[in-house]
């Protein structure tokens, strides 16, 4: 009996479907992070600090249970998690300031330079070259990111668009380093999902504390609303999103993961438009369409469509 017959004539989803869905959900949750920063009305170092340390508390019981179940985490995985987590902490500070300087859409799109950095690091350190389809789509990815972020038209309300753009690009490079780190950790320690993320988040928290002190200190007088938004940021935009990505990314081809992560800036622009009152310009909508098309093509959409057309009628 075939799998379709065993399921009452329904086709069984491809094994890759759930990991792809996990990457998509993680990207959308990460895309909501900038909105939470704006709504919390926190300074950049404060938002980065609280984002990390609240997530550390949330993840701690799960990490302890995982270690009790599987034993000690391989030391090499811990080192990589710590180094990549430190990069993430600096990324958070730069990115949060970019949000405040240049706006949610621009900053979140510019950080998406990670979709090029991540596969490049896998190529350099892992010897796995991205496919020609992905390489050929890189220029379109860049155009889509620029259009979606509105960098061809500076927002009059932006406080410091030049500094925001520079910080956004730097944070994107660091962001790609962290994604590569957790991806590699999962391959070194396949039994561990939460523990490496917890170690990386602690390292990120330490880095945000150092950066916060260097930039004039942290301000915790956020009010009840501010703390609620920071809690949402830590749970949805940090703990849950990175655990999902840690689980899913090793099961999905690197170029596909990188392309699907373009949904992060797309969701940020949409959320900014509907909730934060940011108005999308025609060029931004065009960029959103380009981003969605690239996600569909590199994510295997045409192949799935071809399979459906070739499938014999039931």
Image (tube, grey):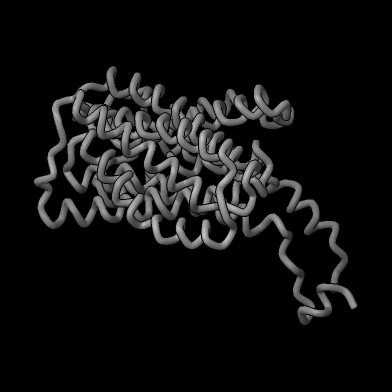
Q: Is residue 95 above or below residue 298?
A: above
Left or right: residue 18 versus residue 209 is: right
At horizontal 52% and vertical 41% (from top left) the residue drawn is: 261
Query: Is residue 259 shown to the viewer in this render?
Result: no
- Residue 164 in the image: state x and y as whole percent: 29, 24
Camera sees residue 72: yes
Vertical relation: 252 (above or below) 9:
above
Task: Give whichever of 207, 258 is nearer the camera.
Answer: 207
* Quarter of the picture holding the C terminus: bottom right
Q: State the quadrant of the N terminus.
A: bottom right
Residue 72 lies left or right of residue 102; in this view the side is right
Q: Is residue 123 left or right of residue 181?
A: right
In the rendered image, the vertical position of residue 72 relative to residue 210, given as above or below: below
Query: What residue is drawn where x is 24% and y is 27%?
Result: 101
Across and down, in percent, residue 226 comes to 17, 51
Name the spot of residue 257 as percent of width and height, x first.
60, 42
For the image, the number of numbered tags is 0
Q: Position of residue 276 (x, y in %)?
A: 25, 47
**Residue depicted at x 63% and y 59%:** 18
């Amino acid at each position: 009996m075939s799998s379709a017959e065993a399921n009452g004539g329904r086709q069984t989803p491809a094994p890759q479907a759930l990991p792809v869905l996990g990457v998509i959900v993680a990207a959308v949750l990460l895309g909501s992070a900038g909105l939470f920063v704006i709504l919390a009305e926190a300074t950049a170092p404060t938002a980065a600090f609280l984002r990390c340390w609240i997530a550390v508390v949330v993840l701690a019981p799960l990490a302890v249970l995982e270690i009790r179940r599987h034993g000690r985490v391989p030391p090499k995985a811990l080192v990589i998690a710590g180094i990549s987590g430190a990069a993430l902490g600096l990324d958070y500070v730069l990115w949060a300031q970019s949000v405040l300087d240049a706006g949610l859409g621009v900053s979140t799109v510019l950080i998406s330079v990670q979709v090029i950095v991540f596969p490049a690091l896998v190529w350099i350190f892992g010897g796995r070259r991205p496919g020609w389809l992905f390489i050929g789509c890189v220029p379109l990815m860049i155009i889509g990111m620029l259009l979606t972020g509105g960098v061809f038209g500076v927002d009059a309300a932006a406080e410091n668009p030049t500094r925001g753009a520079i910080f956004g690009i730097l944070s994107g490079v660091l962001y790609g380093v962290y994604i590569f780190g957790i991806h590699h950790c999962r391959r070194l320690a396949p039994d561990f999902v939460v523990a490496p993320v917890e170690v990386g988040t602690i390292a990120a928290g330490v880095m945000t504390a150092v950066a916060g002190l260097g930039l004039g200190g942290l301000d915790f007088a956020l009010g009840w609303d501010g703390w609620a938004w920071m809690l949402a940021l830590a749970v949805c935009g940090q703990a849950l999103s990175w655990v999902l990505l840690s689980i899913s990314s090793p099961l999905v081809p690197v170029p596909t993961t990188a392309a699907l992560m373009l949904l992060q800036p797309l969701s940020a622009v949409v959320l900014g438009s509907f909730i934060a009152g940011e108005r999308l310009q025609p060029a931004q909508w065009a960029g959103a369409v380009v981003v969605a098309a690239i996600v569909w093509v590199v994510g295997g959409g045409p192949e799935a469509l071809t399979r459906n057309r070739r499938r014999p009628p039931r």
